[in-house]
Amino acid sequence: MINSISAIIIEDEKDAQEFLVSILQKNFPNIAIEGLYDNVKDGIKNIQVIEPELVFMDIELTDGSGFDILDNLTNHNFEIIFISAHSEYLKKSLEYHAFNYITKPFEPKKLSTVINRYVQLKERLFSKQKYILLREFMTDSKLFLNTGSEHVVIHLKDVVKCVADGNYCHFHMIQKSSYMVSEPLKYYEDLLEKKGFFRANRSTLVNINHIHSIYKKEAIILNTKEKIRVSVRTRSNLAKLIKNFT
């Protein structure tokens, strides 16, 4: 059994606040709710005072947004579970490395699944660095891809690799489909580097979850049997990756 998890809730709708509290108290007695807040100012102040481990946060608040809270904190040493009625903020939430994003109205089962995933990952904690790596590549995050004609929602766990093509990028999926998007690979490297993706070489990002083996620290063998060359400049990073998961 893990130790108590300190948490706060930042939500400006009273009914949603009470509903969330009731679910947590009923199903997760190890989560200690340290405070309830409904605005940006109080959110910033009390995160700094309480230093919670977990923050449940609405995005649209009475005096701003949840993103304003994060932008005004110099340190971000807690996990965020966004709970919002607005699905259009999902892509931006990934840029803030949120643990998860739940849209309202939500079922207790959905919230319980997300929290259980967090608890299970924490129980596996061997070191802070390993925990971060495990959390990032196992979190079931979503991403909006702008293909030009539409925005396609994908699960990051289904992405095998991302391949550069000039100022474009190809997302190769586990279902053997692919999407071409009008953003360079660097854009997605910055967005996904803490989501379990490894830059193997100048043109390829690899999803760690789809690595089958590593050959002499020179090549990555994917579950698809494809071999991805590891450039000389990234081999030291690959060595660190191997060490952290050994």
Image: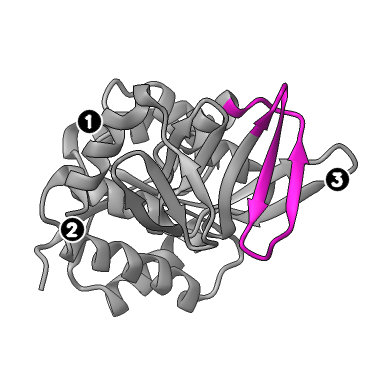
**Residue for point 30% across, 37% down:** 238
Residue 170 in sight: yes
Name the amino acid, label 2.
Answer: Ile
Provide residue 208's location: percent of width, then percent of height: 41, 51
Q: Is residue 18 left or right of residue 4?
A: right
Q: Which class describes the residues within 10 Å of circle 1: few (<14), some (14-19), or many (20+)?
A: some
SS at badge 1: helix
Residue toward you, 21 or 109: 109
Q: From mark 1 to mark 2, how far is it between C-alphas?
A: 16 Å
Q: Which mark is residue 82?
A: none
Q: Which residues are magenta?
A: 164-185
Q: Is residue 50 above or below residue 234?
A: below
Q: From mark 1 to mark 3, how far is it between C-alphas?
A: 41 Å
Provide residue 71's location: percent of width, then percent of height: 43, 23
Provide residue 244's location: percent of width, then percent of height: 19, 46
Residue toward you, 17 or 178: 178
Label 2 close to label 3 by CB (< 8 Å): no
Give the mark nearer the N terminus: 2 vs 3. 2
Name the amino acid, label 1.
Answer: Gln
Provide residue 204's location: percent of width, then percent of height: 54, 35
Q: From mark 2 to mark 3, how far is it between C-alphas?
A: 41 Å
**Residue for point 42% across, 28% down:** 231
Name the amino acid, label 3.
Answer: Glu
SS at badge 3: loop
* Residue closest to the far right: 149
For label 1, the residue is 48
Give the mark nearer the N terminus: 1 vs 3. 1
Q: Which mark is residue 150?
A: 3
Q: Which class describes the residues within 10 Å of circle 3: few (<14), some (14-19), or many (20+)?
A: few
Residue toward you, 68 or 234: 234
Q: Is residue 133 above or below residue 42?
A: below
For label 2, the residue is 5
